[in-house]
Amino acid sequence: MTVRIEDAGVCKKKLCFEITAEAIKEKVDKTLDELSDEAQIPGFRPGHAPRRLVHRKLREQINDRVKTELIAEEYKKAVEDNKLDILREEDFDMDKVEMPEDGPIVFEVVVEVKPEIALPDYQNVALEVRKVAVADSDVEEARNNLLRSRGRFVEQKKTVRIAERDMLTADVRVTCNGETLHEQLESALAVFPQSLGGIRLEKLADELTGKAVGDTVTLKVEVPEGHEKSELVGKEAEVVIVIKSVRRLEVPELTDEFAKGMGFESAAQVDDELRKRLEADVSDLRERARREAMGTWLIDHVAFEVPEGVARANAGRVLNQHLVDLQRRGVPVEVIEQRIEELREASDRQAQRQLKLDFICEALAKAEKVEVTEDEIQARVAMIASGYNRPMDRLYAELEKRGMLDAVRDQIRDDKVFRLLLEKATVTEVEPPADEAAEAAEGGEKPKKKSAARKAPSKSKAKKSEDAGDEASKQ
């Protein structure tokens, strides 16, 4: 057997095989010996039929078995001999490989392999993170979010003027160069920036605000780079919105009765309890800010391209998780559909970042000889099971059955790697920029761009191992 390995793209190899006629004959003879002992040939007892007759009667079965076994054996040997770290194989159709009457079996397999990682000097990294504190504005925002989560959309009178964050029913049509890119009648339309027909409408809320039922809003926008209709890129598109109805979120008043229904003793206690919850998150938030900063440093200092196929698959999983999270939080399906393109872009970026960090952490774990024990895996699964109020052994069995324990192992490995790096690093906490601090102090609008951990969230970021537990808990 001979194998030739060629570069076939980013982190991609093409393995070109040629299995000799001699190897094929040897495998055919061996297979024929095995089948002859059991072959049911009319007129002969099992094991007593002539080999030539057995071969003629079972030729197709023998050829399929020989071809399948030889390809599997030679592929495995090539991967081991050449120390290929395979991530995924592109579609390979066994039926398209011909079993020759005479001569070699020739076939090709394209695979994606792990990238080669050149680690930088990470012994004393200098990092800056935003100082973490719970401000009055954070408590106010948490209270407002709590009230909004219990609000409901109520249809307004036709004379009511539209405000940002209202929910409309509207006829929407997006056209360009005589072609309809998007059309939906009586559709739900949220009043905030979003994408329609593959075109981002940053000024949508501005154009709709102040309008009323019966009004028609027309926007002129340019078809952006990367649009699926490449021939329309750079051309002007027209968005026409006919407003049919307006619904507005009515937020409940914070009363003692409402507070008790939410698990508080009184309305006066709400802010105090929310502050305690936010402050309880500060330690976790600070650690995540340090980890985020270290992750950014690693990505900035380790240059490599990620495998395209794996990246696409990861982005799909991230997007699905985003969609599930939004649905759990009660976001209307119509709103999710309107934002699907920006969600997809965000998922692509997140998946690229996480995939890079996975490869870097794996390389760092090898360099630092970081290992994960079975006891550590069981302890992590027990923690996840506790969060879902499920028996640990049952969740462990489900994760093992579905091949998801590797995600738990990788998360523990990554945690160890980041802990090791941060122990070596010099981390300085800095005050937020003056303009941000002033806005926060005045209770003004938060900056659009999120800083590295300035405010305490009500929920920590999901980890890969928690995702695994969540996935298994659905079964």
Image (tube, grey):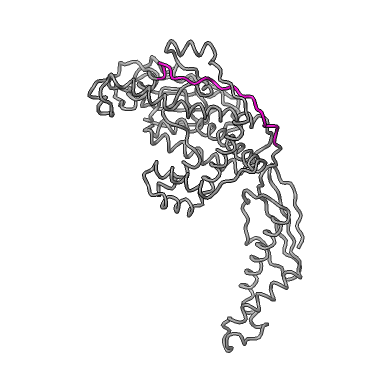
Is 130 rendered above or below residue 50? Answer: above
| Image side of residue 463 versus residue 141, left or right | right
Q: Give coordinates of residue 378: x percent, y percent.
A: 48, 48
Name the residue: 39% across, 23% down. Answer: 242
Judged left or right of residue 157, residue 309 is right
Viewer-proximal residue, 246 or 318?
A: 318
Q: Nearer the viewer, residue 1 or 222?
A: 1
Magenta-drawn stretch, dominant element (helix, strand or loop): loop
> Residue 269 at x, y = what percent?
29, 21
Residue 141 vs residue 210, the one in the foreground: 141
Residue 68 seen by the camera: yes
Q: Give the residue at x 45% y 30%.
A: 338
Is residue 172 located in the magenta-colored stretch of the structure? no
Q: Position of residue 48 (x, y in %)?
A: 62, 87
Labels in figure, total: 0
Q: Position of residue 346 (x, y in %)?
A: 53, 31
One can see residue 246 in this view: no
Q: Residue at x 35, y 20 (%)?
A: 214
Stretch of the chain drawn in magenta: 119-138
The residue lying furthest to the left in this view is: 257
- Give the residue displayed 56% in from the left and 20% down from the top: 429
User: Is 356 above or below relative to 18?
Assistant: above
Q: Quadrant of residue 106?
A: bottom right
Residue 57 as seen in the image, left or right of residue 316: right
Q: Does 195 appear above or below 407? A: above
Indicate the quadrant where residue 360 lies: top right
Q: Which quadrant would the N terminus be assigned to in this image?
A: bottom right
